[in-house]
Image (spheres, rainbow, N blue to C red):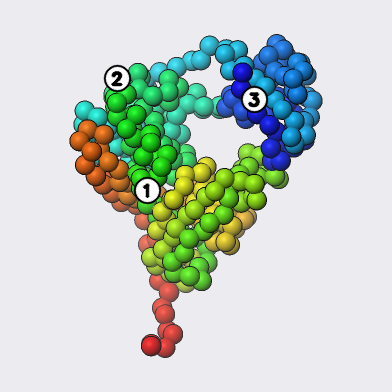
Amino acid sequence: MLVEVVPSALDGERVDRIVAFILDVSRSVAADLVERGTVLVDGVVETSGKLRLSEGQEVSVDPSQIPGEKLPDPDPGVVVSVVHADDHIIVVDKQAGLVVHPGAGNDAGTLVNGLLAQFPEISEVGESHRPGIVHRLDAGSTGLLVVARTQQSYEALVPQFADHSATRMYRALVWGHPTALHGVIDAPIGRSRRDPLKMAVVADGRDSRTEYQVIERYSEPVDCALLECSLETGRTHQIRVHLSSIGHPLIGDPWYGQRRPTLGMERPFLHAARLEFDHPGDGERVSFSSELAEDLNTMLSGLQPLVDDSPAG
């Protein structure tokens, strides 16, 4: 039995929606579990999905009651850009718009479906619904992702992303010019109290640290800056949330962009440009790099660098 205490971000939400969050299943599956009497609220069976719960209440769910899980199918129609593959790992340069693995609302057409068509052996690696996957990128983000090709590799890579010895560097274009050319954003991240589908900086969130370095500042057509960002933790939407929290949201971000214009961008300007980790085969440190995606380069080419006319010395 899986037991969760309702967090402040879900205060006032319906039982079926909370169960969907807990189990990462669709709302309809969650509603069915409630109706079948498999969900307990404060130790009592609850069969109405419409009941709204309060922060601190306890929800118990038996994951074994979830309808038989449909495993992802191979799909050769999904384009997967493989930049490196050996007997242990596959390194992918993910394109924009591609969801990494099946989940609620995305049961096909994911990166995993495409990988299974090229590397069917990963079906036995890691978790069955997201075979081989040891870390993720947002659907709108582009760049590098490593996939485990064997169970041994999976077990060697997962701890590296958990303890952050595997490092990732991102390129991000943000609104405005950060006051400090180099900084660390140290602020806890959790579910937004206004919208549980979004993340936010909240007092009771999980420790989160993002380091950034300003690479270039631009003045036309708007004030903006290109940053390199490194993650010391790996929370959901971390870079997007952290940069927005200091008043410099990503250009093109529809969720955390503070309602600013997209400037023609159809997604957040975020690219996983470099990836380093200890190779699970021989333990040697390996590094991979990825050039900016075409739409991001196009965006940069239309910007005018800031001319710094401050006095020298």
Q: Which residue is mark 3?
A: 3
Q: Amino acid at mark 1?
A: Arg
> What residue is rendered at 45% in x and 29% in y?
101
Q: Quadrant of residue 37?
A: top right
- Quarter holding the N terminus is top right
Dot 3: few (<14), some (14–19), or many (≥20) neighbours within 10 Å?
some
Q: Which residue is mark 1?
A: 168
Nearer to us of marks 2 and 1 is: 1
Find numbered disc 1 in the image and state the secondary structure of the residue it sits on.
strand
Find numbered disc 3 in the image and state the secondary structure of the residue it sits on.
strand
Q: Amino acid at mark 3?
A: Val
Up/down of 138 relative to 124, above or below: below
Up/down of 74 relative to 144, above or below: above
Q: Position of residue 43 (x, y in %)?
A: 74, 20
Q: Which residue is mark 2?
A: 121
Nearer to us of marks 3 and 2 is: 3
The mark nearer the N terminus, 3 or 1, is 3
Q: Nearer the viewer, residue 61 or 33?
A: 61
Determine the CA span between mark 3 and mark 1. 33 Å
Q: Position of residue 163 (x, y in %)?
A: 41, 42
